[in-house]
Structure formats: C-alpha cells, structure tokens
Amino acid sequence: CATETCDKDELFDVLNEVDRRYFLARDLSWEFAMIDREQKGTISERSARFLFQAVHDDFFSPKRFAKFLRSRAAPGTGVSFAEIEVPLCDIPTLDWLEEEKEDEDRQKEELLKLRREEERLAEEARKKAEAKARFEQEAERRRREAEKRKAEEEEARRKADELEKIKRQQEDEERLQREREEAMEAEDLAEEAAEAEAAAAEAARKAAEEAKQATDEASRKAAEEAQKKALAEAMNNKEKRLRANLKAANKSRKTEKLEPAIKDGKAAKMPGLKKDIDEAENTLKNVKAGKALKDAINRRNLQDIEKSMSFIRKSGWEADWGPELKEGDKMANRLRRLERIRAEILELKQSVISEIRSYSNPPPAVHKVMIAVYLLLGYKEKPLLEWKHMQALLGKTGKEGLKRQVTTLDPLKVEMEQADYADSSYLNELDLEIIRDISAGAATFYAWVS
C-alpha cells in the first residue's frame, strides 16, 4: 500500500529517521536528566547550549542557538526537554550550512562596510585636521606677515615722521627767529617813531607858545609855520609808529598784540595805514583759524574740523598750518571711519552679538577683541579675562547693551592711556582679515576699537 503513495526507499529513509530520533531522544533525555540533578524538569540555557554543542559538534551554530533562545515564550527561564528535543535531534543540513555561510558573509560584508566607513571617517577627520592645521599655519603666517608689515610700516612712518618733525622744527625755528628779528626791528622803529613823535609834538607846543608871545606879525607867522611843520612831523611819526606796531604785531602772530595794534591803527583814521591794517586783520584771522582748528582737533569734533580746514584752504593759508592740516585730515578720517563703523554696529543684528556670546570656548582673537572693546568702554580688565563674565556682559540689553554703549561713547571720555594699553596688550598682534575669517561681528568691533 505504501508503494501507491511513496517510494519504498523514501519510506525506508523515513522509518530510519524516526528510529534514529527515537533512540537519540532517549539518550538525550537520559543526559538531560543527568544535568537536571534537582529533578526540576528544566535546565539552564547555558546547560542547553552545552547539549547542543555536544550533539551537533562542529556543526553547532551559535546564531541558530541564539535565535532559538530569542524565540522562546519566556526567555531566560529554565529550558525543558520538550523545548529542545526536536532541534537537538535535527541533523544539520546543507541549508543550515548555506544559511550559516550567508550569515558569515553578511557579517563580513557588514564588518567590511563598517571598516570602510571607519576608514572614510578617519580619512575625513585626517583631512579636516590637515585643513585645520593648514588654516592655522596660514593664519599664523598671515599674522606674522601682517605683524612684520605693520612693524615695518610703523618704523618707516616713525622715521618719516621724525625726519618731518626735525625738518619742521628747523623751519619753525628759522621762521620764528626771522619773525622775532623782524618784530624787534619793527618795535625799534616804533620806539624811534614814538620818540620823534613826542619831540615833534613838543616842538609844536613850543611853537604855539612862541606864536602867542610874538610881538610882531613876522614873528607870529614864523612861529605858526614852525608849529604847522612840527604837527605834520608829529603826524608823520605817529603813522610810522602805528605802522611799525602793526608790522611787529603781524610778525609776532600773537592775538594779544594784533588786536590792540589794529584797534589803534583804525582809531587813527589814517588812509596810509589801510594796507597795514588789512594785512594785520588777515593775519589775525589766520591765527584765529589755526587756533580754531587746533581746538576742533582737541575736541574731536568732525564738523568743526572740516569747517576750519575748509576755511584755511579757501583762504590760502595751507603753508602756515601744514602740520595742523595734516593732523586735522588724519583726525577727520578717523572720525569719519568711526562714524561709519558706528553705523555698521547700529545695523548689526542681535544675532551677530549672540553668535559671539554663544562661544563656549571662543577663539583667542575674538576674546582679545572683546576685551579691548570693553576696556575702552571703561570696564575693569580682570573680570573680562573670564569668558563667562564676558558672556554675561554680551547678554545685556538696553542702556547696558553693547551696541548702545559703543554707539553713544564720547571719544573725549576715552583715556588715551587706557586706549594705548588696550591696543598694545590685545590688538597689536591681530589682523582684520584674520578676524573676519573667524567672525564678521568681531571684525566690526575690531575695526571700531582700533
């Protein structure tokens, strides 16, 4: 009857397999009982693994056993013989081996991918480290070049300024010496004219007395003629005196001498003095314009500086105030730059300041710039060295906010000693381009503080 449903060989194989499983299960149940010494009916998962290894020997698959453990209804609990009877009696098949090989190949592939990923990440990290090192080297090179260039420019500028200063001092000394000599000559002439004027006035007075005492017409006319001549001589010497005083005041270029000399000259109402008075008034305007420029520079008032320089140049007095005009141009450029940077700071978004504040460990250049900024604002140095304290300051708003403080700072209230210290201690080795590469916000504050 079996031949109608299956092959005899197949039936024989099935019967042999049943027979094999029967005797193997009996032997295994005996070994199970030996392991289960307390007769609990279960053994530990570790002991179960031992049985699987003993039965399957070289064909034991840790993965299949792990899969079996995961598939249990209650993983971690004791293992009964019924749970392992069938898998223990199973004969490893080609499918098992292929599956095991596939798992191994898959594992190798995953390990290979993992290794490749690790190598890729390591390569990326290496490239980033190299790029960072190159950037730092380039930054250091640029910093050194900038420092060297700055030092060379400063040295060249210092030498040029020193030579210019020496030349200017020599020219000023020579000019002052000439003016002093000319002023002294004019003063001597004024004294001589004053003496001659006094003598002529005395002669006129005596002639007038003689005219009054004359006994005849001829004597009276002679005395009147002498008086007239003496008065003319007195007026002539007065004009000489006033002209000499105007010239001396003009050469002195001193307001306290020019103003009274001009006043006396105008009071005399002598047409011949008009040219001298005009020249003295022009010199007085010249001197006052120079003083106004110096005052505007000291006050750092851009509008007054530009107004004074424009007036001096339109009047053609550049030669008289060359150094002051040079200093005025320099100060005006600085003030215009300051105003431009103030405008840029006003336009800065709070997010830019927040970006600077967000650094947990800021680049040294950024920290140095912000220290210099707050030093100019009048803050003490020691707390600024602590970045957490700096973060607290950067987080303030309103009147205490950084933007408000920077844009409302009066340059006249900044102590030059404090400014020089901030520059030499924190800004001297920095470069705008390097800082701009790190933080655009910090670069704006660097431009303002420097």
Image: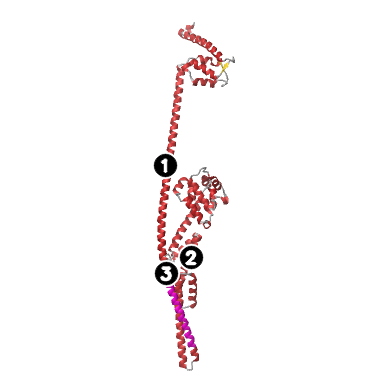
Left or right for 393, reference 93: right
Label 2 crowd (10 A; few <14 / some 14-19 / many >=20): some
Numbered disc 2: secondary structure: helix
- Label 3, secondary structure: give it: helix
10 Å neighbourhood of mark 1: few (<14), some, or many (≥20)?
few
Name the mark on residue 177.
3
**Secondary structure beneath label 1:** helix
* Residue 125 appears in the rendering: yes
Q: Disc 2 marks which residue?
A: 291
Q: Is residue 158 above or below residue 69?
A: below
Circle nearer the N terminus (3, 1)? 1
Alpha carbon of mark 3 to alpha carbon of mark 1: how far?
A: 62 Å
Q: Main secondary structure of the magenta part?
A: helix
Q: At 40% from the left edge and 61% from the top edge, which residue is drawn?
A: 164
Of tags 3 and 1, the one toward the viewer is 3
Gap in angstroms between the C-alphas marked 2 and 1: 55 Å
Q: Which residue type does callout 3 highlight?
A: Gln
Disc 3 to disc 2: CB gap under 8 Å: no
Q: Which of marks 2 and 1 is nearer the N terminus?
A: 1
Whichever of callouts 3 and 2 sits on the residue coming sooner in the sequence is 3
Q: What residue type is labelled 2?
A: Lys
Q: Where is residue 65 in the image (x, y as percent from the top left)?
A: 51, 20
Gap in angstroms between the C-alphas marked 3 and 2: 21 Å
Above or below: residue 254 compared with residue 21:
below
Q: Which mark is residue 134?
A: 1
The residues colored magenta run 180-208
Q: Is residue 35 magenta?
A: no
Identify residue type, mark 1: Arg
Which of label 3 and label 2 is nearer to you? 3
Measured from the top left, where is residue 410 in percent x and y?
53, 56
